[in-house]
Structures are given as C-alpha cells and as structure tokens.
Amino acid sequence: METFDFKVGRSRIQGRGLYAASPLPARRKLGELGGEVITEREARRRARASDCIMIVEFGDGRALDATHSASPFKHVNHSCEPNAFMRVCYGRVEFYSLRRVEPGEELTCDYGETHHDGTLACRCGSAKCRGRL
C-alpha cells in the first residue's frame, strides 16, 4: 500500500482535523483507523459522556473507540461535501480519497446517519450542507 503524509491541526469544522501534507491521488486507500473494539452499548455510553466522539459502530453490536488511538484518522471530520469516504467492514475502518486532495486541505467524510438522529448541528460550512447530523 502507498503511504501518504498527513498532519493534524486546528479545524474550522470541529476541534482538530486531519490535513493532507502532500497531494493525495483520487480513489486511493489513505489508511485505517485504530482503536479499542467495544460493545455498541459501551460505545453509546461513552459517547454520551464526551463532547468529541471518536467512535465508529460496525453495525454488528460492536464499535471501534479511537479516542486513545495514535491513528491520525481519528481527526477526520464530517462534511456534507466530503473529499474522502470511510469504509467499515470486517472489523476495520478504512479511509479512501474520493478525488484528488491538495496539500493543506482538510480530509473529510460524510458521517451519514449518526446516533445524533438529526439533533446535532452540522458545522461543515459546505454549500451543500444538510444542516444536521
């Protein structure tokens, strides 16, 4: 697998974000999210107690909590007009570029349906913003 350079920095979307440090080609695997595999029930308990949620549910009763992971991909923020997507399968969370990403551009993916059930205001700033997560 190719390796790409990233940097973590302040984000206008939410707290910290992940940025391309060099050009990223379209339609390439960028990397994987690491963390602790926990039950979905435990994931939701932890999410209620946190302002910054770094948890991905697998849909099979398990979830990945990346809060204490060293993976930079835990800083990928949501956008309604993303430049990357998250693939969740076989107990893995992988990130792929949708299009060419320029150096300094923040990596974003569409979180899709979330446990917020439309109650969390979206802050992506995209012209195509849906307004809620």
Image: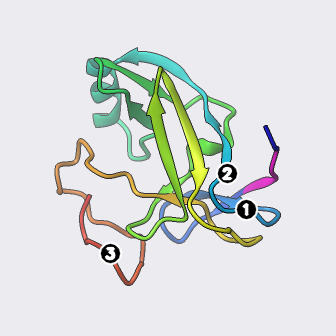
- Relative to the observer, which residue lies in front, 118 or 47? 118
Q: Is residue 80 magenta?
A: no
Residue at the disc numbered 2: 28
Q: Secondary structure at mark 3?
A: loop
Amino acid type at mark 1:
Pro
Q: Determine whether label 1 and label 3 are within 8 Å by CB.
A: no
Task: Identify the secondary structure beneath mark 1.
Answer: loop
State the residue position of label 1: 25
Residue 42, by quadrant, is: top left
Residue 56: percent from left, percent from top? 41, 34
Q: Quadrant of residue 70?
A: top right
Range drawn in magenta: 3-7
* Residue drawn at x 74%, y 71% as measured from the top left: 104
Marks 1 and 2: CB-CB under 8 Å? yes
Q: CA distance from mark 1 to mark 3?
A: 25 Å
Mark 3: few/some/many CA within 10 Å (<14, 14-19, 20+): few
| Kind of residue indicated by mark 3 | Cys
State which tag comes first along the sequence, 2 or 3: 2
Q: Which residue in the protein does label 3 denote?
A: 129
Q: Nearer the viewer, residue 53 or 20?
A: 20
Q: Is residue 4 magenta?
A: yes
